[in-house]
Image (spheres, rainbow, N blue to C red):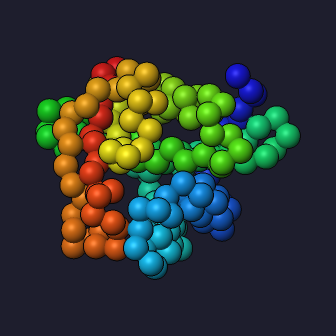
């Protein structure tokens, strides 16, 4: 396992987070969007207003991962207190995003970031960590990390009409702490 450093991002890091967000999303998912859809989604997730509000929210943390040379590995987004969607566990941490730069995919970096999120949940005395992963995404990675399928659904067709229908499946997974 490589040496990974994590830095909690602040409002001053907004331009960096926007750049890393785009660089870590675009290589993996262009095939799931109709024309113009990926640009819409990247803007939806990483626009200045949304990120600015999240970076100052006491309930949201963004963490930037770098290697020993300072090269960006990726980032993760944690919502520190968010109940499981089915209401079964109100005291949970939501692991909203784990995004990696293409050069670091398959090298254990994602596993490291997931374990960091679980440890953060322990520090906060949460009872569970949960996430949503696209059905076409790395479901097995989360299963190997102890996450179990809670339920599956289709993304909202109104909001995600720019996404190809066959890719709208999403799984909610949870791991008890």
Q: Which residue does the image show at 66% across and 48% down from the upper left?
A: 102
Q: Residue at position x 38%, y 46% from top?
A: 136
Query: In the shown orientation, is residue 158 left or right of residue 167?
Result: left
Residue 29 picture location, percent across and down: 49, 58
Q: Give the quarter of the figure containing the C terminus.
A: top left
Can you name the residue that lies furthest to the left here? 87
Quadrant housing the N terminus: top right
Residue 35 drawn at (x, y percent): 44, 78
From the viewer's perspective, tell me whether residue 36 is left or right of residue 62: left
Q: Is residue 130 above or below residue 55?
A: above
Q: Is residue 170 left or right of residue 37?
A: left
* Residue 168 locus on image (x, y percent): 29, 57
Would residue 125 be visible to someone looking at this image? Answer: no
Query: Which residue reaches farthest right?
Result: 69
Please identify the residue farthest to the bottom as the structure is shown. 36
Instruction: Give the vertical position of 35 relative to 26 (above or below).
Output: below
Q: Nearer the viewer, residue 94 or 53?
A: 94
Using the image as rendered, state which of residue 10 and residue 132 is in the foreground: 132
Please say if 148 is above or below 159.
above
Is residue 163 visible in the rendered structure shown here?
Answer: yes
> In the image shown, does 124 or 30 lie closer to the viewer?
30
Residue at the image position 21 percent from the left and 55 percent from the top: 154
Q: Quadrant of residue 85?
A: top left
Q: Between residues 130 and 48, which one lies in front from this camera angle?
A: 130
- Image coordinates for residue 174, horizontal then vertical, percent: 29, 31
Q: Is residue 123 above or below residue 48?
A: above
Circle count: 0
- Residue at image position (14%, 39%) is 87
């Amino acid at each position: 396992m490589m040496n990974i450093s994590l830095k909690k991002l602040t409002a001053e890091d907004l331009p960096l987070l926007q750049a890393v967000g785009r660089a870590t999303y675009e290589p993996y998912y262009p095939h799931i969007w109709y024309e113009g859809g990926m640009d819409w989604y990247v803007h939806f997730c990483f626009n200045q207003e949304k990120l600015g509000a999240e970076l100052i929210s006491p309930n949201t943390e963004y963490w930037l991962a770098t290697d020993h040379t300072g090269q960006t590995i990726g980032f993760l987004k944690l919502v520190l207190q968010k109940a499981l969607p089915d209401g079964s566990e109100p005291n949970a941490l939501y692991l909203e995003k784990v995004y990696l730069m293409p050069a670091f995919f398959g090298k254990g970096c994602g596993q490291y970031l997931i374990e960091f999120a679980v440890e953060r949940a322990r520090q906060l005395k949460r009872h569970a960590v949960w996430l949503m992963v696209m059905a076409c995404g790395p479901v097995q990675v989360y299963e190997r990390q102890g996450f179990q399928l809670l339920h599956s659904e289709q993304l909202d067709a109104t909001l995600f009409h720019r996404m190809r229908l066959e890719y709208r499946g999403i799984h909610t997974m949870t791991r008890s702490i």
